[in-house]
Amino acid sequence: MQIAIVLYDRFTALDAVGPHETLARIPGGESVFVAERTGPVRNDTGSLALVADRTFADVPAPDVVIVPGGPGQQDQMENEVLLDWLRAADATSTWTTSVCTGSLLLAAAGLLAGRRATSHWLLLDALKAFGAEPTGERVVIDGKYVTAAGVSSGIDMGLTLLGRIKGDEHAMAVQLLTEYDPQPPYDAGSPDKAPAALVEEFRARRHYLLR
């Protein structure tokens, strides 16, 4: 099983690394980072780089596609090299997935029309423009399409997908070995729970924050 994780300039690191950590150890699996060009690709802060060992052309038919989000997603919305690869890879993939605003790239490729999907809460409504049905759920499965909400939900998406691929017991074993037992110090991880003033502040600054 080949798992292709897409990289592009200014992606959000945890969007890619979270699913990688949960899925990369599937027995017989191969996890590869892919981009337009091989080499290091910088994340949204510029302080960290992941290495794309393969180009899109090198990985024409992965079994699983994972598209991270990040501020750089906006610059990729009309990148036909990426969008064409997503369409071609999706034609034969078993699972096509995204984390955070990566779902907007799947949508821009025409893959989410008529489907339920999620994204980062600040851009959730943007899915409507592509014919998708936005939902605030943390992980959404619609057929072979699995979309996850903001950043940290990529770990949940990875475990959910792992359960579908290898069974619940295997997924629970990975959860245990990674000691994924969230106990956050604050209960402010969604707009429904965070202080209203914070939510409104970030809504007002949305375009600046996601540039």
Image: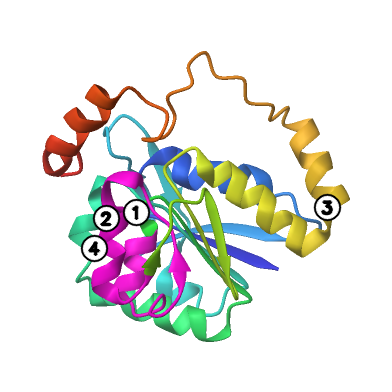
- Residue 35 vs 203, above or below: the answer is below
Check whether the beta carbons of the residues at disc 3 and disc 4 lie within 8 A of each other: no
| C-alpha span from label 2 to label 4 | 5 Å
Which amino acid, by three-letter code, is at mark 1? Thr
Q: Could you tell me how many numbered marks the image carries?
A: 4
Residue under label 3, please give it.
168
Residue under label 1, please give it.
101
Residue under label 2, please give it.
73
Helix, strand or loop at mark 1:
loop
Helix, strand or loop at mark 3:
helix
- Residue 72 vs 193, above or below: the answer is below
Check whether the beta carbons of the residues at disc 3 and disc 2 lie within 8 A of each other: no
Check whether the beta carbons of the residues at disc 2 and disc 1 lie within 8 A of each other: yes
The magenta region covers 103-132
Which percent across, then down, holds residue 145?
Answer: 54, 70
Residue at the spot 36% in from the left edge and 72% down from the top edge: 132
Which amino acid, by three-letter code, is at mark 2? Gln
Which percent across, then down, holds residue 99?
Answer: 45, 52
Residue at the spot 45% in from the left edge and 75% down from the top edge: 115
Residue at the spot 36% in from the left edge and 47% down from the top edge: 120
Check whether the beta carbons of the residues at disc 2 and disc 4 lie within 8 A of each other: yes
Which amino acid, by three-letter code, is at mark 3? Asp
Helix, strand or loop at mark 2:
helix
| C-alpha span from label 3 to label 2 | 32 Å
Residue at the spot 43% in from the left edge and 51% down from the top edge: 136
Of mark 3 and mark 4, the one earlier in the sequence is 4
| C-alpha span from label 3 to label 4 | 35 Å
Residue under label 4, please give it.
76
